[in-house]
Image: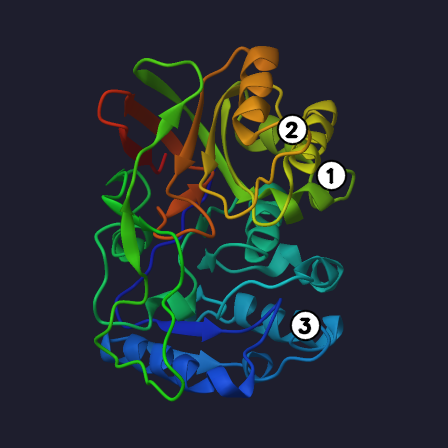
Amino acid sequence: MIRYPFLQEGTTIGVTAPSSGVEPDMHRLLKQAIRRMEEDGFAVSTGDTVWTQHKAKSAPAGLRGEELNRMLQDDRIGLVLPPWGGELLVEVLEHLDFERIGEKWILGYSDISVLLLAVTLKTGLATAHGSNLLDLRSGTFDATTAKWREALTTPAGGAVEQRSSEYYQLEWKNRLPGEEETEGDPVFNLTEPTVWKSVSGGDVGFNGRLLVGCIDVIRHLIGTPYGDVRAFRDTHLPGEPVLWVLENCELNTADLRRSLVQMKLAGWFDNCSGFLFGRSPANTPVGGYTAVDVYRDLADELGVPVLYDIDCGHMPPQLTLINGALAQVEFSEEKGTAHLLQMFK
């Protein structure tokens, strides 16, 4: 059984940086994001780690773990929301007390997906893969990003519907030197029409329990106490298939393929119903071997549907995807669009 937190109106949001903190020249954006949450009716408890960054991390692992433990165990905090991802969250896992994590949401993506997946696999507590705090600093949201709040306020037994976005971001906005961002400006530069694609061709429909993450970092959970997918399935999802949602931040196609093969050999893809792959700023071909070739090889080996260029990862906007939720995906090849129903059961 999966346990689903519920985001109460007016609850406290805990802002901590278990991966990277925010450099001083970006503090104004962090303050803007905190102010936005307060204007939306939330209280905000901000840890020390968010304001610092040194040698690829916000603080030493022990300090990051201590602050994160405190927020995960504080009953007043209903959502833990890091400013963004980073590089070295994996260092923090051995410092966490998984048995004392309260019933609350954790939301984020990129390196934060290491924490999200580890918590769900270890405890059966649903976690939310989606926008980070800095993404939510504007009062102007696209329809896809705006779904984060509905997803987190859907009670156990309920369902949330999402659709593929209309446009996505190819490049971040380039501002002139000294040009300031105003609080009403959209965060994302949504210029490109979104088109989801299928390896097999034709309309596709499938379902399964969601497990989500950035493949660059979650692959490092394999063989550790924090990445036991088989034990998670046996304990919390006996007999149910898993629908994997993966995105690639920096890997070339050969490294992507190696990572997927390692996951398969580790048993992560046993009883898998299908895959959704996010749009990627990476996926550099190696020797003519493209990302589509990688997806096709995986589909052929496992005999499951594979959709790609979906709204997940480092080319916003992105769906809010709940680790552990039962998801039904319906995809139309003609329109390149999809409907995703997540059921909290």
Is residue 96 left or right of 248 when viewed as pictured?
right
Judging from the image, the colouring scheme is rainbow
311 w.r.t. 89: above or below: above
Q: Amino acid at mark 2?
A: Trp
Is residue 204 left or right of 101 when viewed as pictured?
left
Q: Amino acid at mark 3?
A: Lys
Circles 2 and 1: CB atoms closer than 8 Å: yes
Q: In this rendering, does residue 109 appear at all?
A: yes
Disc marking residue 57: 3
Who is closer to the viewer here, 196 or 35? 196
The residue at 37%/27% (across/down) is 197
Q: Secondary structure at mark 1?
A: loop
Which residue position holds label 1? 222
177 w.r.t. 153: above or below: below
288 w.r.t. 280: above or below: above
Is residue 32 left or right of 182 when viewed as pictured?
right
Which residue position holds label 2? 268
Can you give x and y, in whole percent of width and height, for residue 150 in the image?
25, 52
